[in-house]
Image (spheres, rainbow, N blue to C red):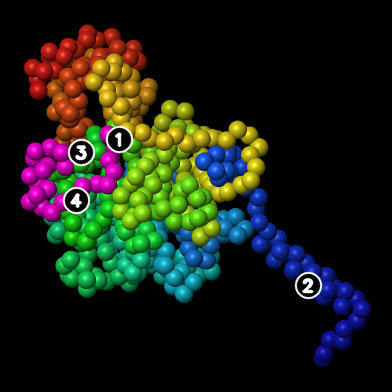
Amino acid sequence: MPIIPTPITIVRLSFISVLAILLIACSDKKNDLQTIDYVQLDKSLLKVEVLSDSLQVPWDMVVSNDRNLFFTEQYGAVSVINLETNQQRKILVIPEVWHKRTAGLLSLTVHPDFKQNPYVYVHYTTKTDSLIYNHLVRYTLKGDTLISPKELLKIKGFTAHNGGRLAFSNNGKLLWATGDAYNGDESQDVNFLNGKILRLNADGGIPSDNPNPKSYVWARGFRNMQGLTVTDKGYIFTSEHGDAIEDEVNLIEKDRNYGWPAIEGLHNLPQEIAFAKANHTKEPVKSWTPVIAPSGITYYGSSAIAEWKNSLLLSTLKAKSLRVLKLDEEGKAITSEEIFFDNHYGRLRDVCVDADGAVYISTSNKDWKPQVGFPLAGDDKILKISLTDKALKKPLLGSKVSALADTKDKAIDAAQLYQNYCVSCHQADGKGVKGIFPALAGSNLVNGSSSNLVKALLKGINRAENPQKMPGFAFLKDDELAAVMNYIRQSWGNQAAKVTEKEIKQNR
């Protein structure tokens, strides 16, 4: 029997229609963001807003071509934020992720043509009994869920040095920056996939134009890459952790050797120069000593923030800052460096850019390496940096890095030496990181025989039961070593006798 509309049913239907429209409108309503800071550049004024907070170590971020920001959290979750509405939803939790130190759900990227190929690629660590692996897996986004996992590659992993960044080259090849898994020798061996730039087809196959058409290896000789980006000209850059010295940014070229473990940073020691000549190695385009722990890196090619155009944006962990590394016109060399947010937001894990030129940075203050004064309220966060025309409070400023001044006659600052070379592991309060980096406060090694401490700092410590070795610091001068040893022997309640330069010289 047909339903004959009456005035009452028409009113009811109209009400239901209006309600449905309102519900749809509410679901698409844009969430307002909290502005927490402003930044003044030479001409541009920027605002810093909180895009997301209360996260668990957001490790990697990428913006798709349909204006969605995808990100991982180290414990095993993938989420997405609609950049039109700022609304966030969790689309995957991977229960088999093994999360310890710097192992876990690490990097992700999306297919370059995401609208046509809704693929999300992730890299995560698992552990079964004593076997640790890093997995490269492709998922398909369907609705609000990632489905149909397809494992493309599995390589050896460890509790640290898993590397773990993904990016697509401009010709559609998938790049995976892997760590050496605490076995530096394998970085040089093309039969192993650790310590390499790997190059894959989007479906996981080996490209026919790889150096060896039967191998994923594109470049080798890396320690622990933490950042990977491709410029508008197709140049590939990585950021990498050094050991005690020489953090790096590298320009990646086909079939090149980047030296680790025979070479660390610049090729400036006799044995490094000899290795470089014999092995077709390439020097970094930038290195830092003291180290800054560079992490995520991205190319900024937008005209939106004019001062940053044609730059590499680099997030740092130890240095707790965002670095703007200006490139030359060719796009292969770094010409200047500027530092922003120095110790302001804490450890910064990643950085990415959207199509409008807005920049996103993620904090890492709840990771395995807690810092004095952090985490801040609401950490961890994803922050959005974009143009504005008015500041409601005093803007933050950047600082340009100038060439090092001559330090020949400069007084030695023992506290600064500790900050430069020791604090990232042993912490500002000398308490270290429990179970990983030993405390210096009350340490038997620090307070005991000075000769044992001298030998440890000159030659390093490498215990079989703990592969987290301490590198040697023989590159420091005798007076610098004496200063930093005496600093730690007289700090945090330690009261040990002073170490002399003569004693250091005798033990070299």
Question: If you read the primary sequence from the N terminus, does the residue marked by circle 3 or circle 2 appear first?
Answer: 2
Q: Which mark is residue 355?
A: none
Question: If you read the primary sequence from the N terminus, does the residue marked by circle 1 or circle 3 appear first?
Answer: 1
Nearer the observer: mark 1 or 3; the answer is 1
Residue name at image x 83 percent, y 73 percent: 14
Q: Which residues are magenta?
A: 267-289
Reading the image, the residue beneath label 1 is 291
Expressed as whole percent of the image width and height from the top left, the position of residue 51 reads 56, 49
Reading the image, the residue beneath label 4 is 282
Distance between mark 1 and mark 2 Cα atoms: 61 Å
Q: Dots 2 and 4: beta carbons under 8 Å?
A: no
The answer, for residue 187, to whether it is visible in the render is no
Q: How many marks?
A: 4
Distance between mark 3 and mark 2 Cα atoms: 65 Å
Disc 2 marks which amino acid?
Ser
Instruction: Kindly indicate the quadrant of the structure image that contains residue 485.
Output: top left
Nearer to us in this view, 292 or 233: 233
Residue name at image x 49 percent, y 42 percent: 380
Q: What is the crowding at mark 2: few (fewer than 14 residues within 10 Å), some, or many (at least 20)? A: few
Q: What is the crowding at mark 4: few (fewer than 14 residues within 10 Å), some, or many (at least 20)? A: many
Question: If you read the primary sequence from the N terminus, does the residue marked by circle 2 or circle 4 appear first?
Answer: 2
The answer, for residue 21, to whether it is visible in the render is yes
Nearer the observer: mark 1 or 2; the answer is 1
Disc 3 marks which amino acid?
Pro
Relative to 344, is 490 above or below? above
Disc 1 marks which amino acid?
Val
